[in-house]
Image (tube, rainbow, N blue to C red):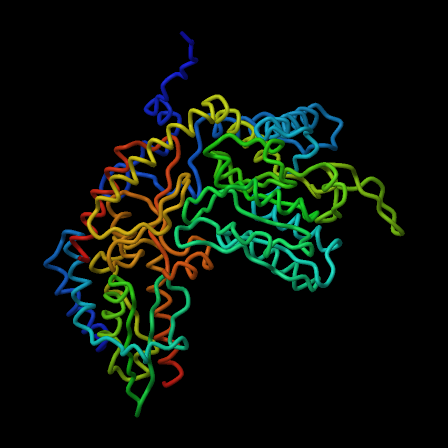
């Protein structure tokens, strides 16, 4: 099991206690609220992720082989999704971040409750993270 | 004592039974509440049956073959054109050009004006337009050196017609304006715009995509020069729509695409073009689509567009009243006259968040900028939640939306 897998399993375990979709979305929102926001002046257009229907900012880079990522969104649900990705990827070795698979959303059934457009936004965020990690790996 | 003709009551439950998709459920067995009719409308069984019958019994290429199938297909397709003519109140069937939809119809006209406009001419649109009635004109302006002017909008979502004379000048060659805003539901009073345009000799194109499904259309009474609408927003198939143009204007515009069916005589030295409407219908047309659209319009005319408009006006008034009572709800656009669409925001909740929860509850609405980013920019919002009704929606659908919004508030409030 890789570090990314271990982190996703921990998140999946937290969500495992919630089977009602409304409560699951609530937990996702709370997960997003727990993530430190980006300062307003850090939300620059060059950090915007294309392909999301809400505005999503991703600030990612690699320092001394360690991948760092922070994120924010004006949608609370997307912020929740972004916070899960940040928890999975932030601090991973860049080469692992560049290749890690993301399975936690389908594992906990969140994908079933989110409209396809949002799923596209999730894909776009993951793609942006992977590309940033590849540049630093 | 006067005797009034009282129209038969609009039996919405009987009408709903004509639309098989309205009986389906989504997610864990929730009834579908479809309030995204400004994006596309559902199809009655008669349209589905007509499409199947065409492919099962009549499929052939039109306008060409000597065989019986081709003759029958051609007749059905041309009968559909006459249905569109009747639906629009047009003087001639050859003034009706089948297109892929509203977008292609506007592109066809904008392309044609490429041979008419010169540098310094002006094209006028309004601040309420869908991107489909902005971008083709921008592209035209870039090609010709013409300038794009915009009729401004008030905070209410109504157009500001006080300064029409400043926007529509004697340099204007074409004025392209929406009949009803897809984003806000504003019904635009067209008469002063058409009068101002014609006073300076400009042609007028009206985007009636959001009117055709909801109210009677009469292009001759309207007085515009081009009117366009989409089949899929009018209970017909996707990939089909219509352009109506005054014969004199259609004659003046050059062909849009070259190919088969639109020619009179082809040699390598020179090609002469067919007359109307074939001049604008290059290649094998969407025969099934045209025939299906004809059936949809027959269905709509049988229901009666006056009855549809009256029923929807009552439903919209109910929706506005119920939504106004939702805590934290703010209408985006409060136009003097509204058709079909209501845009709103709920407190600080992002439209996508609201739309996602509503979707999970079985309520289909549209969220985002509704292909009208300048409208959103003008009103200073990133997007809205938009509910848009058709004649098959009920007060119960509105109630489901309002109940859903309470759940949205509970989750994000």
The outermost residue toward the bottom is: A64
Between B380 and A109, the residue placed more toward the observer is: B380
Q: Position of residue B205 (x, y in %)?
A: 61, 45
Q: Is residue B214 left or right of residue B266?
A: left
Between B352 and B31, the residue placed more toward the observer is: B352
Between A17 and B79, the residue placed more toward the observer is: B79
The quadrant the C terminus of chain B occupies is: bottom left
The outermost residue toward the right is: B269
Q: Is residue B4 left or right of residue B74?
A: left
Between B32 and B196, the residue placed more toward the observer is: B196
Instruction: Identify the residue at horizontal 63%, vertical 41% (top origin).
Output: B226
Vertical placement of residue B193 versus B47, above or below: below
Instruction: Identify the residue at horizontal 14%, vertical 51% (top origin).
Output: A20
The quadrant the N terminus of chain B occupies is: top left
Instruction: Identify the residue at horizontal 75%, vertical 43% (top origin).
Output: B260
Vertical placement of residue B403 versus B93, above or below: below
Q: Position of residue A133 (x, y in %)?
A: 35, 80
Q: Position of residue B199 (x, y in %)?
A: 67, 45
The outermost residue toward the top is: B1
Vertical placement of residue B220 versus B158, above or below: above
Instruction: Identify the residue at horizontal 32%, vertical 24% (top origin).
Output: B13
The outermost residue toward the left is: A17
| Circle count | 0
Q: Position of residue B370 (x, y in %)?
A: 43, 53
Q: Is residue B77 left or right of residue B190?
A: right
């Amino acid at each position: 099991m890789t570090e990314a897998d271990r982190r996703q399993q921990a998140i999946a375990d937290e969500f495992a206690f919630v089977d009602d979709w409304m409560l699951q979305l609530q937990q996702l929102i709370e997960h997003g609220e727990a993530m430190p926001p980006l300062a307003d002046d850090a939300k620059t257009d060059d950090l915007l992720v294309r392909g999301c229907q809400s505005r999503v900012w991703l600030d990612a880079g690699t320092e001394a082989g360690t991948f760092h990522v922070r994120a924010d969104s004006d949608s609370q649900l997307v912020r929740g999704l972004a916070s899960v990705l940040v928890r999975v990827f932030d601090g991973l070795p860049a080469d692992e971040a560049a290749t890690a698979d993301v399975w936690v959303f389908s594992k906990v059934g969140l994908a079933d409750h989110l409209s396809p457009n949002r799923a596209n936004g999730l894909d776009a965020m993951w793609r942006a993270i992977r590309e940033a990690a590849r540049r630093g790996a | 004592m006067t005797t009034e003709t009282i129209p038969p009551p609009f039996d919405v439950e009987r009408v709903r039974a004509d639309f098989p998709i309205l009986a389906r459920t989504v997610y864990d067995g929730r009834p579908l509440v479809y309030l995204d009719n400004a994006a596309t409308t559902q199809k009655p069984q008669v349209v589905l049956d007509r499409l199947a019958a065409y492919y099962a019994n009549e499929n052939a290429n039109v306008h060409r073959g000597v065989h019986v199938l081709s003759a029958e297909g051609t007749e059905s397709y041309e009968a559909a054109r006459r249905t569109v003519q009747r639906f629009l109140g047009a003087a001639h069937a050859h003034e009706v050009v089948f297109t892929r939809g509203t977008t292609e119809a506007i592109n066809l006209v904008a392309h044609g004006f490429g041979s008419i406009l010169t540098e310094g001419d002006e094209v006028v649109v309004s601040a309420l337009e869908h991107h489909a009635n902005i971008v083709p004109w921008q592209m035209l302006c870039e090609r010709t050196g013409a300038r794009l002017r915009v009729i401004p909008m008030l905070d209410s979502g109504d157009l500001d017609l006080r300064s029409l004379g400043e926007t529509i000048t004697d340099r204007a060659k074409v004025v392209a304006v929406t009949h009803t805003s897809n984003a806000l539901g504003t019904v635009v009073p067209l008469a002063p715009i058409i009068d101002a345009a014609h006073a300076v000799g400009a042609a007028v194109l009206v985007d009636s995509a959001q009117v055709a499904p909801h109210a009677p259309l009469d292009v001759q009474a309207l007085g515009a020069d081009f009117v366009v609408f989409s089949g899929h927003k009018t209970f017909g198939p996707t990939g089909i729509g219509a352009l109506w143009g005054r014969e004199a204007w259609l004659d003046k515009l050059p062909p849009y695409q070259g190919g088969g069916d639109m020619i009179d005589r082809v040699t390598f030295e020179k090609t002469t073009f067919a007359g109307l409407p074939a001049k604008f219908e290059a290649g094998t047309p969407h025969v099934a689509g045209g025939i299906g659209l004809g059936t949809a319009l027959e269905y709509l005319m049988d229901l009666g567009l006056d009855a549809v408009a009256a029923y929807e006006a009552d439903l919209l008034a109910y929706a506005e009243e119920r939504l106004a009572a939702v805590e934290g709800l703010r209408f985006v656009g409060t136009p003097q006259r509204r058709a079909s669409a209501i845009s709103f925001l709920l407190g600080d909740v992002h439209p996508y968040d609201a739309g996602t929860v509503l979707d999970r509850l079985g309520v289909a609405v549209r969220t985002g900028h509704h292909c009208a980013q300048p409208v959103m920019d003008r009103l200073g919002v990133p997007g809205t939640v938009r509910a848009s009704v058709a004649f098959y929606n009920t007060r119960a659908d509105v109630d489901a939306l309002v109940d859903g919004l309470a759940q949205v508030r509970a989750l994000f409030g």
